[in-house]
Amino acid sequence: CQRRLIDDESHSDLSEPLTIQVLTVGDLPQPKIKFTYFVKKPAQPVSEKVPGKKKESFNAIKEIISSEWVIEEWGECSKSCGSGWQRRAVECRDPRGRPATDCAQELKPSDIRPCADIPCPQWQLGDWSACSKTCGKGFKKRLLKCISYDGGVLPQESCEPSKKPKHLIDFCNVTDCS
């Protein structure tokens, strides 16, 4: 969309290039921006308007070369499940790649983020079995499974060993044998 909001008689094109720096934050796509910039013509007395006389210009525009934030890839998550953290290096560097201090702090990308937000596998105890004897002293047991967050059965090594339930076998005494 191009709009012209000025009167061409009172404005003229720039004689030098105009550099406009557009800063963006995050992983957003680069904006598509087009600028047309005009300078208001100076008021000249009629006597000064000499045909064929050119006015000298000078370059008042300097390229702005500034430092920028340089980011590395995210590192490994501190945990494979539960609530972990990921880190990456974020450094201010000048155009030659040397460390610098003049980057805008408010534009600094994050160097840490949460990760591994899936629940960890959990131990699941089954019901007690029937007593091994119909009379006298016997034992009963129950199964122990390692279950994933979506309900699937996993190898026992996948669950946290320190949280493994201890009471898997117990004695039982139904009735005295006589």
Image (cartoon, rainbow, N blue to C red):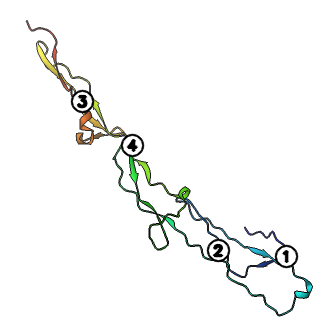
Q: Estimate the spatial distance between the alpha carbons at disc 3 and disc 1, rounded to whole Å.
A: 86 Å
In this image, 148 relative to 132: left or right? Answer: right
Q: Estimate the spatial distance between the alpha carbons at disc 2 and disc 3, rounded to whole Å.
A: 68 Å
Label 2 or label 3, whichever lies nearer to me, is: 2
Lower sequence index among marks 2 and 4: 2
- Residue 129 location, quadrant: top left
Q: Residues within 10 Å of mark 3 (few under 14, many from 20)?
A: few
Q: Circles 2 and 3: CB distance less than 8 Å?
A: no
Q: Which mark is residue 165?
A: 3
Q: Nearer the viewer, residue 167 or 77?
A: 77
- Is residue 134 placed above or below 57 in the rendered structure? above
Q: Which mark is residue 83?
A: 4
Residue type highlighted by circle 1 = Ser
Lower sequence index among marks 2 and 3: 2
Lower sequence index among marks 3 and 1: 1
Q: Nearer the viewer, residue 123 or 174?
A: 123
Label 3 or label 1, whichever lies nearer to me, is: 1
Residue receiving disc 2: 19
Label 2 or label 4, whichever lies nearer to me, is: 2
Residue type highlighted by circle 4 = Ser
Q: Residues within 10 Å of mark 4 (few under 14, many from 20)?
A: some
- Is residue 19 placed above or below 140 in the rendered structure? below
In this image, 30 relative to 125: left or right? Answer: right
Residue type highlighted by circle 2 = Thr
In this image, 82 relative to 129: left or right? Answer: right
Residue type highlighted by circle 3 = Pro
